[in-house]
């Protein structure tokens, strides 16, 4: 359970709780074992894959609730998909929090993203 137990009474309470759960448990059957073997549960994952999964979980809500914008200009036609995503996300942050940051490595078009964000925010209001 990955807990630190202080004192015998806590240990006794946890042991009783575990024994109760264990009493309700059922043995694995062949169907469950077959399902586990076909799932991702037994797959070995790299630290990078865990990092990506964690990162996705942290930003999933922003991706799902991304603001839909249409710039209707020459800027939008010139943006790559990842830049359009940045514009939607930061525009949403500005609407929700009053500001946001665009940070990326050199050469990925932060100036274009900034221009598109400015146009989107000015269009909203």
Image: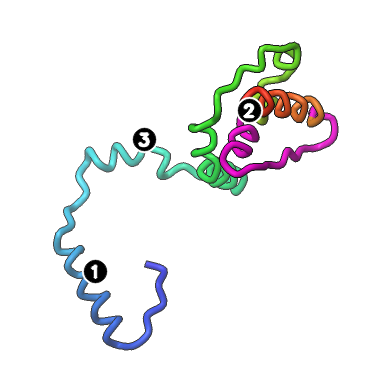
Number of the front mark, 1 or 3: 1
Q: Position of residue 24 (x, y in %)?
A: 15, 59
Residue identifier under label 3: 38
Residue identifier under label 1: 18
Callout 2 secondary element: loop
Asked if residue 120 is positioned above or below residue 42 in the image, the reply reads: above
First along the sequence among labels 1 and 3: 1
In front: 113, or 48? 113
Q: Residue furthest front?
A: 125
Asked if residue 121 is positioned above or below residue 8 in the image, the reply reads: above
Q: Position of residue 108 (x, y in %)?
A: 79, 29
Circle 2 residues within 10 Å: few <14, some 14–19, many ≥20? few
The answer to whether residue 125 is left or right of residue 78 is left
* Residue at image location 27% in from the left, 75% down from the top: 14
- Tell me the CA gap for discs 2 and 3: 52 Å
In reply to whether residue 94 is colored magenta, the answer given is yes
Where are the magenta residues, as a range? 88-109
- Tell me the CA gap for discs 1 and 3: 29 Å
First along the sequence among labels 1 and 2: 1
The label shown at residue 125 is: 2
In front: 40, or 74? 74
């Amino acid at each position: 359970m990955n807990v630190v137990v202080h004192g015998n009474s806590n240990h006794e309470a946890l042991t009783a709780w575990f024994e109760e759960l264990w009493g309700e448990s059922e043995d694995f059957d062949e169907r469950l074992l077959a399902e586990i073997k076909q799932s991702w549960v037994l797959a070995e994952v790299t630290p990078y894959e865990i990092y990506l999964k964690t990162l996705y979980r942290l930003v999933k809500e922003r991706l799902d609730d991304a603001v839909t914008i249409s710039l209707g200009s020459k800027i939008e036609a010139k943006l790559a998909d990842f830049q359009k995503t940045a514009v939607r996300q930061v525009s949403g942050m500005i609407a929700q929090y009053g500001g946001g940051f665009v940070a990326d490595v050199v050469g990925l078009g932060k100036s274009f993203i900034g221009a598109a964000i400015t146009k989107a925010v000015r269009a909203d209001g």
